[in-house]
Image: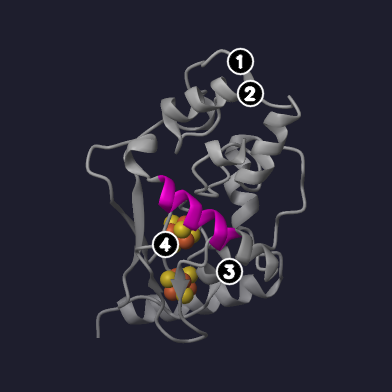
Amino acid sequence: MLAALPQTQCTRCGYPDCAAYAQAIADAQTPINRCPPGGAEGVQRLALLTGQAALPLDPAYGTEGPRQMAFIDEDWCIGCTLCLKACPVDAIIGSSKTMHTVLEAHCTGCELCIPVCPVDCILLEPASGGQTGWAAWSEAQATAARDRHAQHVRRGKPEALPQTEPLPPAHAMEQRAATPIDSRRTIVEAALARARARRAPS
Ligand code: SF4
Ligand code: SF4
């Protein structure tokens, strides 16, 4: 079942990663039409495996569209490392107080890094032309993302993955992106102050 999912680890299905959604499908706990990155073809794949009808994607969990890729506006990055921790496939490199960069070859377009950036310097750009779903994402890319996520989990980076019950779609990404330490507020306030200072006319 897991191999039928695209391994973007985006959490849009309401589960903390593709493996958790695959397990829930295998356990007949959830419908097969909640994975926007897999698109209609992904639903077909799951329908074949489960014997269920290939329903249209449930729009409450997102819509099928071209794959995107994150990039960091390095002029504004303050090196807070929050995105580093949020990325489920370790596609971002950088260290504290240094500029961060997205490794394009590894970015799945999950968007989980976007909400954590305190200075909004992570942007998305189209990465697949007009292609969507599995037409925009190869088996090799899915396998690589699956391996990188497994490595990421082994290293213990995900900070908000304990839940096994699905979250409502509107809350899933927020939970996944959340940094559960109080110091985040301090980091964010300091970052915003510095960003404002840099943006102020001299
Ligand atoms: S760089 Fe951002 S969009 Fe790309 S995989 Fe990592 S968290 Fe997702
Ligand atoms: S979250 Fe934003 S500011 Fe912080 S390291 Fe990442 S890109 Fe830079």
Q: Earlier in the sequence, mark 3 or mark 2?
A: 2
Q: Is residue 16 left or right of residue 38?
A: right
Question: Within 8 Å: ligand 1 and the Cβ of disc 4?
Answer: yes
> Where ligand 2 lies, by image quadrant?
bottom left
Q: Amino acid at mark 2?
A: Pro
Q: Amino acid at mark 3?
A: Lys
Disc ID at residue 106: 4
Q: Residues within 10 Å of mark 1 (few under 14, many from 20)?
A: few
Q: How far apart in space, not on screen, are marks 4 and 3 (Cα)?
A: 15 Å
Q: How far apart in space, not on screen, are marks 3 and 2 (Cα)?
A: 30 Å
Question: Residue beneath label 2, please?
Answer: 31
Horizontal and vertical percent for residue 14? 63, 38
| CB atoms of marks 2 and 1 within 8 Å | yes
Horizontal and vertical percent for residue 3? 56, 41
Q: Is residue 73 left or right of residue 88?
A: left
Q: Amino acid at mark 4?
A: His
Work out which residue is located at the far top of the displayed protein and give it.
53
Task: Name the quadrant containing residue 137.
Answer: top left
- Give the residues drawn in magenta, as a range: 139-149
Q: SS for tag 3?
A: helix
Q: Nearer the viewer, mark 4 or mark 3?
A: 4
Q: Amino acid at mark 1?
A: Gln
Disc ID at residue 52: 1
Q: How far apart in space, not on screen, are marks 1 and 3 (Cα)?
A: 37 Å
Q: Nearer the viewer, mark 3 or mark 2?
A: 2
Disc ID at residue 85: 3
Q: SS for tag 4?
A: loop
Q: Earlier in the sequence, mark 4 or mark 1?
A: 1
Q: Earlier in the sequence, mark 1 or mark 3?
A: 1
Q: Give the camera-side residue of 120 and 166.
A: 166
